[in-house]
Amino acid sequence: MDKGLLQHVLIVEDDSAIAELIAMTLRVSGCEPQLCHDGLEAAALLFQHEYDLAILDVMLPGLDGFQLVEQLAAQGVRLPPILYLTAKVDVPDRVRGLRLGAEDYMLKPFHPVELQARVDGILRRHRSRAPGYRVLDVVLDPQTHTVTRAGQPVDLTPQEFALLELLMRHRNMALSREQLLEVAWGYDYLGGSRTVDMHIQRLRKKLDWEKVIVTVFKLGYRLEAPA
């Protein structure tokens, strides 16, 4: 694996010792792991952020690994490749995970070398998929942190970029002001949701998207565009 390009991996595992072992294994492969210990927290992270891979335990508090994928897929969330890692050995459970679109399924206990090999294989298969989003004539590239409109660069603030990325990831979905605020400013931001409104107005003007980013009454905003 090319260590010059970090791969972002979400590890969802409620056993802290196992989670740390997985994280340590992935760092050796040049990955940047993020740890999470329950299904509800994982759902929020997968909704808000882009990952190259998610390693999910099946038995999780909040939402189990299957419910997590089913719920987000039903909402139209674009999911990363999924590797299920679990102690469950029942064939129906393994089949269910694979039918949900999982790339692979490993049983605990696992050997770190095998885990590393499987992760490398998944990332290698998906690396050619160009990250980024295109809506109409606007292209957003999360890796280079650039936005172009009709081939011309658009200068955005970090908050405007984060808002646009979330809207483009979840096109045609209504997003609340609170969701947008958390992504662009963080959970501990003390300002009000009016800040979101001001930045959305700036985005509309910069992209000429007055009719593309629509206001959802009493909720927030939705980016309306062909899927």
Image: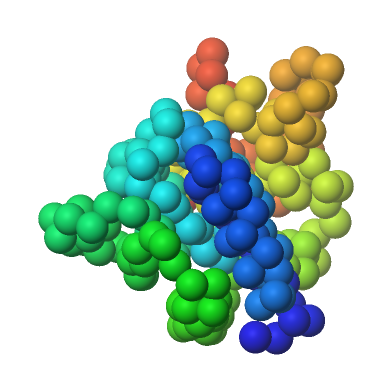
Residue at x 27%, y 52% (from the top left corner): 88
**Residue 194 pos. (x, y %):** 76, 18
Figure quadrant of residue 150: bottom right
Q: Up-down: is 105 above or below 48?
A: below
Question: What is the number of callouts on the image?
Answer: 0
- Res. 75 in view: no
- Where in the figure is residue 19, as x and y percent of width and height? 58, 52
Q: Residue drawn 59% across and 70% down?
A: 131
Pick the residue in front: 45 or 154: 45
On the rendered structure, is 52 left or right of 110? right
Q: Nearer the viewer, residue 59 or 112?
A: 112
Residue 216, image x, y percentages: 51, 24
Describe the colour scheme in one phrase. Answer: rainbow
Residue at 69%, 30% in the rendered image: 182
Question: Can you see residue 29?
Answer: yes
The quadrant of the image that shows the N terminus is bottom right
